[in-house]
């Protein structure tokens, strides 16, 4: 398995090989990665609206199509050599927004149908889904700060810490507390 994924590198490579011709066709048709990100968000939003309207099966189909469609923005970017940090950020943000719209649609539909437990569970699932992204983001940011703090602690010898390490330790501690 690859780091942070349930999908093995071999499986990921196989999926990308199957997706690439479709991505190239989309690019030839004039679709950009950012356009595909927005189209994916629109599909997810449609799924959320359908759920809110108590059209559960159609909502599930549309949401599933939207999540499958989500792989194409990155595939087009890789196939056309147009990957960028901004595009990756935009994709990530709109993916979370799309998930949120779907969950809110489920909460609304469940509440209107008198399915209170389903509404509560959907709200809890939404929070949990967002916490995964948040925890990953914070860990990527804070791990560097923690490593800096731990590196100064390892240089303590015989109860004496150099002034440089004292400053680094104080700075690292202050930045950890600030977050």
Image (spheres, grey):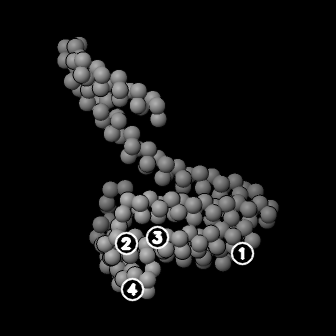
Q: Secondary structure at mark 3?
A: helix
Q: CA distance from mark 3 to mark 1?
A: 29 Å
Among numbered discs 1 and 2, the one appearing first in the sequence: 1
Crowding around mark 4 (Cα neighbors within 10 Å: few <14, some 14 to 19, many 20+) is few
Report the mark closest to the observer, 1 or 4.
4
Among numbered discs 4 and 3, the one appearing first in the sequence: 4
Q: CA distance from mark 3 to mark 2?
A: 9 Å
Report the mark closest to the observer, 3 or 1.
3
Q: Quadrant of residue 43?
A: bottom right
Q: Quadrant of residue 120?
A: bottom right
Residue at image mark 4: 28
Which mark is drawn over residue 55?
Answer: 1
Q: CA distance from mark 1 to mark 4?
A: 35 Å
Q: Secondary structure at mark 4?
A: helix
Residue at image mark 3: 34
Q: Nearer the viewer, residue 137 or 174?
A: 174
Q: In the rendered image of this protein, does residue 15 appear above or below residue 131?
A: below
Q: Secondary structure at mark 2?
A: helix
Q: CA distance from mark 4 to mark 3?
A: 15 Å
Q: The N terminus is located in which quarter?
A: bottom left
How far across and how far down the image is residue 176, in percent?
Answer: 41, 31
Among numbered discs 3 and 1, the one appearing first in the sequence: 3
Can you see residue 20?
yes
> What residue is at 36 percent from the left and 83 percent from the top?
24
Crowding around mark 2 (Cα neighbors within 10 Å: few <14, some 14 to 19, many 20+) is many
> What residue is at 43 percent from the left and 49 percent from the top?
136
Residue at image mark 2: 77
Q: Quadrant of residue 121?
A: bottom right
How far across and how far down the image is residue 172, in percent?
Answer: 35, 29
How far across and how far down the image is residue 64, in percent?
Answer: 55, 74
């Amino acid at each position: 398995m690859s780091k942070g994924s349930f999908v093995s590198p071999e499986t990921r490579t196989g999926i990308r090989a199957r997706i690439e011709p479709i991505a190239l066709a989309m690019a030839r048709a004039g679709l950009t990665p950012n356009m595909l990100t927005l189209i994916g968000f629109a599909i997810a939003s449609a799924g959320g609206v359908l759920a809110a309207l108590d059209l559960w099966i159609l909502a599930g189909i549309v949401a599933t199509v939207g999540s499958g469609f989500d792989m194409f923005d990155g595939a087009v970017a890789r196939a056309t050599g147009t990957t960028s940090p901004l595009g990756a950020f935009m994709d990530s943000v709109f993916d979370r927004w799309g998930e949120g719209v779907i969950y809110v649609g489920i909460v609304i539909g469940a509440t209107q149908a008198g399915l209170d437990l389903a509404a509560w569970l959907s709200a809890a699932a939404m929070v949990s889904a967002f916490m995964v992204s948040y925890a990953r983001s914070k860990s990527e940011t804070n791990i560097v700060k923690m490593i800096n703090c731990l590196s100064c602690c390892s240089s303590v010898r015989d109860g004496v810490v150099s002034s440089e390490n004292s400053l680094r330790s104080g700075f690292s501690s202050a930045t950890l507390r600030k977050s």
